[in-house]
Amino acid sequence: MPEGLFPRERSEPAPGAVHVPGWLPLERQRELVEACREFGRGPVAYESTVLPGGGVMSVRSLHLGRRWVPYRYLDGVAVELPDWLVELGRAALVEAYGRHRGYAPDTGLVNFYGDGARMGMHQDREERSPAPVVSVSLGDTCVFRLGNTEDRGRPWTDVELASGDLFVFGGPSRCAFHGVPKVYAGTAEPALGLRGRLNITLRETGL
Ligand SMILES: O=C(O)CCC(=O)C(=O)O
Ligand SMILES: [Fe+2]
């Protein structure tokens, strides 16, 4: 359980993967939570993704820019990825790697983890661009499992992602398997005004 007793330090759990705890101050987190609420008012919505086997994902997802469906990106865009999220992605890469190399994400995925939601081990591999994935967490703390590039199994490293944390995976970790096996319900800072966990990921599809 996250106890908040120990300072959480920046780490590089695998080559190309960088975790920056507490990257965003509370006020910025609140703005992002409000923006995620606003996105859900339309014209796109938070929806549970149905997998080809019939399973339904427990997270509810909203797509900005290019829309992902299992396991490809659709043509066309219902809602543009806002410029300020592109800028956030660039700032994230500068924070993680010292430069952003013209990072131009064209898809943003907002995942909401309500009670009991989790995400199985998978690769983000429908993009053609090798540019990193930027991930920002809001609300409840979770266990983020960063695996290897071969399969869903071990070796993996578990990292706790709390509200305001940045996680970037690029380079040799870009196609690492990863997932969210656990969310610690009720751990969000009450002042954030969010029950559950939100995760924003930015990617360049290269499509
Ligand atoms: O929620 C997270 O931290 C990870 C989300 C993720 O892996 C994805 O949307 O592909
Ligand atoms: Fe992913």
Image: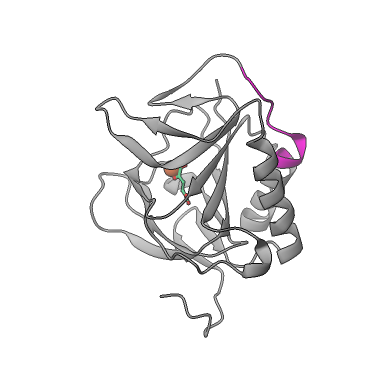
Residue 102, image x, y percentages = 70, 36
Q: Nearer the viewer, residue 148 or 75?
A: 75
**Residue lying at 68% horizontally and 68% vertically, measured from the top left:** 191
User: Which segment did they paint magenta?
Assistant: 77-86
**Residue lying at 43% horizontally and 48% vertically, measured from the top left:** 173
Relative to 160, does residue 7 appear above or below in the rendering? Answer: below
Residue 110, image x, y percentages = 56, 41
The residue sitting at the top extreme is 75
Q: Magenta segment, principal secondary structure?
A: loop
Q: Nearer the viewer, residue 184 or 73?
A: 184
Relative to 175, does residue 16 appear above or below in the rendering? Answer: below
Residue 11, image x, y percentages = 51, 67
**Residue lying at 61% horizontally and 27% vertically, measured from the top left:** 44
Query: On the picture, is 127 further left or further right than 107?
Result: left
Q: Quadrant of the image for the C terminus? A: top right
Query: On the picture, is 175 further left or further right than 95?
Result: left
Task: Please say whether residue 103 is visible from this viewpoint.
Answer: no
Residue 164 in which image quadrant: bottom right
Q: Is residue 137 magenta?
A: no
Q: Quadrant of the image for the N terminus? A: bottom left
Task: Please say whether residue 80 is visible from this viewpoint.
Answer: yes
Residue 206, image x, y percentages = 56, 25
Relative to 76, does residue 59 appear above or below in the rendering? Answer: below
Query: On the picture, is 201 further left or further right than 1?
Result: right
